[in-house]
Amino acid sequence: MRLRAAVALGCLLTARGQLPQVLEEAMDHVHPRARAELETFFAPGGPHASFKVRVEEGCIGGAFPVYDWKKLVPVDAKWGLESLIAARLHQSKWFAADADNALVAFRPHTGERSLLTKCRLKLERDFPGKQFWFAAATDRGRCCDGGQLRDPGLLNHHFLVTSGERRRGAWLFREHNTKHAWRAPATRDTAPRLRCFDPSMDVALPPPAFVRGLYRKRDITRDLRAANATRRFLAVHAEGGVAPPEYDLRRALTERWAPDWWANARNRSWAGHPDLLIRKALGRAEHGEALFASKYCLVVEGYAPWTPRLSEAVGAGCVPAILSPALLPPFAGVLRWRDFAVLLRPADIGNLPAVLASHDHARLHANLLKVRRLLSFIATGPVNDDDALPLIVFEMWRRSRRRREFLEGTATALAAPAAAPAGVHSTATEPLKVAFACEADGTSCAYAVRGARWNCSRRTKMACGCAKE
Ligand SMILES: *[C@@H]1O[C@H](CO)[C@@H](O)[C@H](O)[C@H]1NC(C)=O
Ligand SMILES: *[C@@H]1O[C@H](CO)[C@@H](O)[C@H](O)[C@H]1NC(C)=O
Ligand SMILES: *[C@@H]1O[C@H](CO)[C@@H](O)[C@H](O)[C@H]1NC(C)=O
């Protein structure tokens, strides 16, 4: 009975306002230009009513993993994005089997990373000149996990990824090591400096945070806890049980704020800094509780700029304090992140309590509650315009309208300017035409960048590396 009343109320609100309520609620934290475009898209009879997306299944079966994209389960805790988007889109009003815009149903995580290139080559053969949307939850989207651009051809298509990366500023490459793919030395410039992510083509999404099913559906109790601004700790961070020491920023936090960790790991009364719950590791349950008991949750880059910690923090109403210089946060072209998050610099680590205390937590927390649903995914029940999906569709529409010309064998990459000194990791980028050719099996691509020829190839199932020819 109560459920029916809630559904009826939802319809009433949608009919009255033009924007879905989840967006209406967030409007104070939307950039003015995006606000105008959102109002255009969702106007009665506006583009939202005619914009449709189909799901392309050409990369399922045969040489590709077989995958029932209409099924939501099993949704992987960290990599569930590609299963989620296609299935939810299919259930939504934006799905049409014959639409011109196509989302590729594909599970890169389940297979070798080179399958993404193989899929691109197949689709370009089957649909010459057509551009697709890839929902890719591989670590760095169209790049290798270490951040090296693996296949420039993927730049001719759109990506929906969790790894939004800035088009200027720090570069984050992790090197591949044959013994320990994940234990790479910290950032070094071992590939052409081309960006993995292009904000004019791609959409950065919040990572799904479905750890043990916690965040798959609305939960009133959790929402009430998230809304509680009274919190015992100033900040929480767990470096992680498996994080290799090369995760330099995470390690720097532990070394500064939990210096005696090795000696004190089993000492329950040892508290480190009284306001910071910063540890080498926390148990899952303890960490889950700490997210609700902390004002700020540190979201720190690891192997890649993104981490599901962002969504865990948002879900718990814990203001994200992001320490990931290369990260472009989800929907950054729409949402004003400084209204509800803190963007930290590596230099802030030494002074963390004072830096965090200088922010107005009450304001940030109140604002976070207004965008919290927009940064979440509901994976159960009918699609109700109650999570990130309406904004994702808007972002797809926005980018589909301003498409680059498609030229086979050539792509436009965001590159460091020719004058940028090689050792400088913090630079602006500019669009650069790159000529490329890939092996038919997708395992390597060769391309030219300002006169230098590179070959980026598969080294292990997951990792690849680039070499100058
Ligand atoms: C908010 O959290 C504090 C600290 O955990 C708790 O004491 C208080 O009862 C909570 N308030 C509400 C309204 O739940
Ligand atoms: C545990 O930590 C407390 C508080 O810092 C300290 O007083 C105590 O000596 C520590 N115990 C051991 C066995 O290290
Ligand atoms: C890249 O290098 C590998 C190893 O030398 C070679 O087998 C492959 O053909 C090269 N790829 C391209 C696209 O030229």
Image: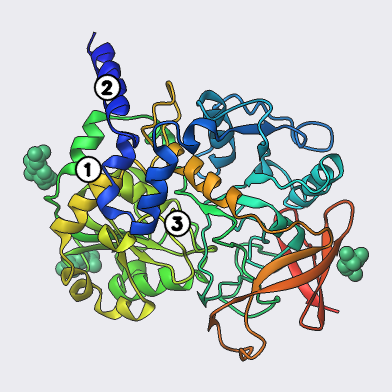
Residue mark closest to the camera, 3 vs 1: 1
User: In the shown orientation, is residue 19 left or right of residue 271?
Assistant: right
User: In the shown orientation, is residue 47 left or right of residue 447?
Assistant: left
Return the residue at label 2.
12
Of labels 2 and 3, earlier in sequence is 2
Q: Determine whether the beta carbon of the residue marked 3 sits less than 8 angstroms from the nearest atom of ligand 2.
A: no
Return the residue at label 1.
226
Outermost residue, top direction?
1
Q: CA distance from mark 2 to mark 3?
A: 48 Å
Q: Nearer the viewer, residue 167 or 315?
A: 167
Determine whether the residue tagged by mark 2 lies in a helix, strand or loop. Answer: helix
Determine whether the residue tagged by mark 1 lies in a helix, strand or loop. Answer: helix
Residue at (54% x, 62% y) in the render: 304
Residue type at tag 2: Leu
Q: Quadrant of residue 227?
A: top left
Residue at (83% x, 54% y) in the render: 442
Residue type at tag 3: Gly
Return the residue at label 3.
241
Residue mark closest to the camera, 2 vs 3: 2
Above or below, 306 against 195 in this view is above
**The C terminus is located in which quarter?**
bottom right
Of labels 2 and 1, earlier in sequence is 2
User: In the shown orientation, is residue 60 left or right of residue 6?
Assistant: right
Q: CA distance from mark 3 to mark 1?
A: 26 Å
